[in-house]
Amino acid sequence: MQFSTVFMKGVADIIVLRILDKYGDSYGYQLIERIAAESKDVFALQEGTLYPLLYKMERDGLVTSKRKTALNGKERRYYHITDVGTKHLAARGKEFQGFVQGVHSVFDWSFV
Amino acid sequence: MKPDEYIDHVVTEITDDALQQRLREELTEHWEDYSENADMKKTPKELFGDETLLARQVNAAIQPSTFATDVALSIACGVGTMIFFVLLSGFLDLDLENLSVADRLLRIISAGIGVVLWCGIAGFLSLAFQRRMMIRYGESKRKMILYAIAFLAPVLLLGFEESLGGVFAAMQTESFVAAMWKLCSLLATLGILYGLFAIPKRLLVRNMTRTDQMYVWLQNHVPLAIAVMVTAGAVMLIVDDVVTTVSAEGFQVLVIPFTMPLLLLYLFWGMVSLSIGAVLNLLGLSVMFGFWASVMVAIFIGALVPASFLIRRKAMPLAVKIAASVILPLMIIIPAVPHDVPSIEWRVPLVWDWDQLERTQLNVTYPWAASLMRRNDGMSMGYAAYISGEALIVMQGGGASYRVTRNGVPEIPSPDGSTSIFRGIIPDAYDPIPVGFTCDGKPLEEFIDTHMDTTAPLGMFGTGCDELAYHGKVIANISRNHGGALIDLDLAPDGLLAVSINMGSYDPTYVYVIDIKDVIGE
């Protein structure tokens, strides 16, 4: 599903952080694939959105990056969630959870 | 577009050198992984998005937030839009009474073109502003900046007294209705500005992807649009200059909207070049130094910088593209600009003329644009001349005076230093007219300021004189096709006569030195 940029802007960082937290260090292509798989293709994060986002998160100290050899033997740049990133994820995740619960209560969706 | 070409395009627009290499690496590797694994095959543009947009997002992501710069840029956007609007509304004449149907139509078409142009420019500026705000700031900060612009633009443009101060003053001195009217006008201005910036925001929020694509397309074509506009405006000004007759009034009406952007650029450049000129004056550098320095700066910014980007095969930043799109057409067109030089048939020997220095003067103060706009430039370039001992002294209105030796070499600056003169503004700046001169058979006793005389050519300043004579002996026949009126005469005891001829109140003045000792002797 394609969400508007404004909508995605609010949650894209915590989605990336969550994937890094769950799967450990990942590179760009893996992140896109894992986000799509984890969200059952609901969040199709665009490649053009991912890299600027990763650079901003690195600038803000939420992630670090390092070149490492991947399982297929190729060199890739892996992103790693920092302590600051973990705290940010916890705080924003909780905030977002409250938001989703609120929306759930209002709409009374049975499938959530 | 091939993947390598796409990645090259994106990377060359990245401002940070270290990040250029890193982004190239990551995009190449991502494309490699995608090509090997994905079932659906997209083009690089489909996968990563528009290359310019991606580069801008990366640039925006790594740059620290510069709130003050953004506010300044936003105010500049608002003020620029307002100035353009004020200029346009001031020049366009929609008084349609007592006009033929054709003339009415022409004025309406001209106004229509002007409004469309203004909407285009204002729309792009506000879209650019909103997009920048959305990338960088949250809703509250965006609103704050928006209010700041709406509030500050009229104050900056009209001045405090004409905007907010005017309302307060009207409340104290005028009637309640008048004060309310002023308040409503100001609120309407604020409302228009707010609407101008709020509408693109709605568009952006509702359809981010499309407006992004539209913005990128516009941005990619802005330099071309500016180049076309500057060229069209410049060419129309030249044509207008050549065909200045009453019958060409319709054409002049059509020229107005096309020359507005040029006028806006010109005002900006006028401010910059006047500041540079002031510094050069303080440093005691020669006029020619200023002229050549300005020429070199224009060539550097307009041609050499863009050429270096082309040679290095790097994408030009937008500012460089815009600078080139303004300067390059002007550099090509200016040599073709006809100059209004008085057409005079001298019946006595011409010793020296001011023509060459006059041109240099204009170019120093308003480089490049001056040649195009010179018909509107003479106000600060009036000269009065008198002969003193071994030299001709030429005083320049609003500037330094010059001592010119009799072999025609100017010495700058003169011992007189800076002398501000302007006929009509400073009384008694000119010596009395020497006795014995006649203009078309009538004694020349004073020079006429026909500026406000509707029967004279527009803005004519000085006494029109087809035939100038001294004690019945014809000295010169002066053509008045494009101006050409006497504003000053000074006769030296040895028979040298300095004649100042003005091409119109907004046009340059030319000074000639002629030898009439044979006429005096007869």
Image (cartoon, coloured by chain):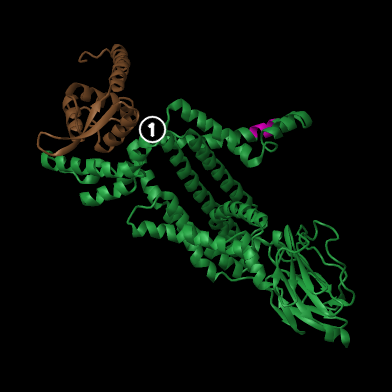
The residue singled out by tag 1 in the image is B205
In this view, the residue farthest toward the right is B435
Q: Quadrant of residue B431?
A: bottom right
Image mark 1: chain:
B
The residue at the point 31 percent across, 21 percent down is: A84
Residue projecting furthest to the bottom: B522
Quadrant in which the C terminus of chain B appears = bottom right
The quarter of the displayed image where residue B291 is located: bottom right
The verdict on residue B181 being magenta is: yes
Residue range corresponding to the magenta coloring: B180-184
Q: Give the colour in which the image draws chain B.
A: green
Q: Please, what is the dominant secondary structure of the magenta stretch?
A: helix
Between B64 and B366, which is closer to the camera in this rendering? Answer: B64
Circle 1 Cα neighbour tier, 10 Å, few/some/many (<14 / 14–19 / ≥20): some
Which residue lies at the image location 72% right of the left edge and 30% below the top edge? B168
Is residue B25 visible in the rendered structure shown here? yes
Q: Is residue B320 left or right of residue B34?
A: right
Of residue B57 and residue B242, the one placed in the foreground of this image is: B57
Q: Which of the 4 image quadrants contains residue A20? A: top left
Residue B48 on the magenta span: no
Residue B323's spot in the image, x, y percent?
47, 54
- Locate residue A80, reporting x and y percent: 23, 27
Q: B264 and B422: which one is in front?
A: B422
Chain colored brown: A
Q: Secondary structure at mark 1?
A: helix
Q: Is residue B250 visible?
A: no
Q: Residue at x 30, y 28 (%)?
A: A8
Q: Tell me the kind of residue under disc 1.
A: Val
| Residue B396 shown left or right of residue B270 in the figure | right
| Image position, residue B393 (x, y; %) | 77, 68
The reply, left or right, for residue B92 in relation to residue B123 is right
Q: x, y percentage for residue B205?
A: 38, 32
